[in-house]
Amino acid sequence: GRNVDLFVALARALRERAVRFVLIGVAGANYYAHGGSTLFTTEDRDLFLPLDADNLAQCWAACEAVGLDLWSAREPLDIPRDRWLAERVITRRALTHASGPDVQVDLALEMKGFEFDAVWAERRMFAVEGVDIPVARLLHIVESKYAAGRDKDRLFLATHREAITELLEREDRDGN
């Protein structure tokens, strides 16, 4: 669908700019399902980014390059979207958000219970339409959802317990 194509375009733009990011959340969990089929429905994608102003500014540039609008706290993100602004956003650990037709991407500087470098070190690469997309370990995604403890996270974990357990067991078996 269109949203997959636009997300792949974004992933390509991020890779071209050497942006460090890891896909987390429900969209990340989907990559562990059989053959990349959508096991869990989600409207948005969550990218976890390090606390690095240059990296964040390059991430914003990649979003703009593929035509996504950038938002912060329901308002368009300030311009210029440079290192100075990125430093302010990082100081506040503020969430920025990229949106386009059928695509919502949260640019997160925090992942409950985890530091970026630990998640990055154990990331998995999934090739989608020729683009390598770094995805957090399923175990990290699930543990972070438990740690967050929001109603929607508890509901997701309860609803999909069997599927998640099966996928985690496979992750262990595959020796990763």
Image: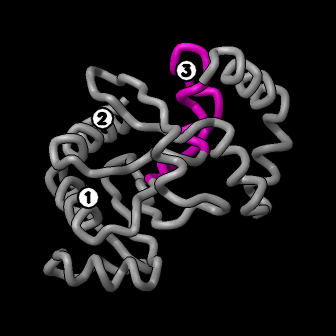
Is residue 34 covered in magenta?
A: yes
Note whether 31 is above or below 134 in the view shown: above
Nearer to the camera, 58 or 80: 58
Task: Check disc 3 and give the amino acid type.
Answer: Ser
**Which mark, residue 59?**
1
Residue carrying label 3: 37
Q: Nearer the viewer, mark 1 or mark 3?
A: 1
CA distance for labels 1 and 3: 27 Å
Q: Are marks 1 and 3 in contact (CB under 8 Å)?
A: no
Q: Residues within 10 Å of mark 2 (few under 14, many from 20)?
A: many
Specify start and end residues of the magenta stretch as a single range. 26-47
Which residue is pictured at 79% across the width and 44% down the height? 157
Vertical side of 165 occupied by 105: above or below: below
- SS label for mark 1: helix
Q: Residue at x 68, y 39 (%)?
A: 139
Q: Which mark is residue 8?
A: 2
Residue at image position (55%, 60%) is 115
- Tell which circle, 3 or 2, labels the residue nearer the N-terminal end: 2
CA–CA distance in space, label 1 to label 2 = 14 Å
In the rendered view of the protein, which quadrant contains the C terminus?
top right
* Residue 150 forms part of the magenta stretch: no
- Side (left or right) of 30 relative to 50: right
* Mark 1 crowdedness (10 Å alpha carbons): few <14, some 14-19, many ≥20: many
Residues at marks 3 and 2, CA–CA distance in whole angstroms: 16 Å
Q: Reading the chain from its start, which is encountered first: label 1 or label 3?
A: 3
Closest to the observer, 120 or 112: 120
Position of the N terminus by quadrant: top left
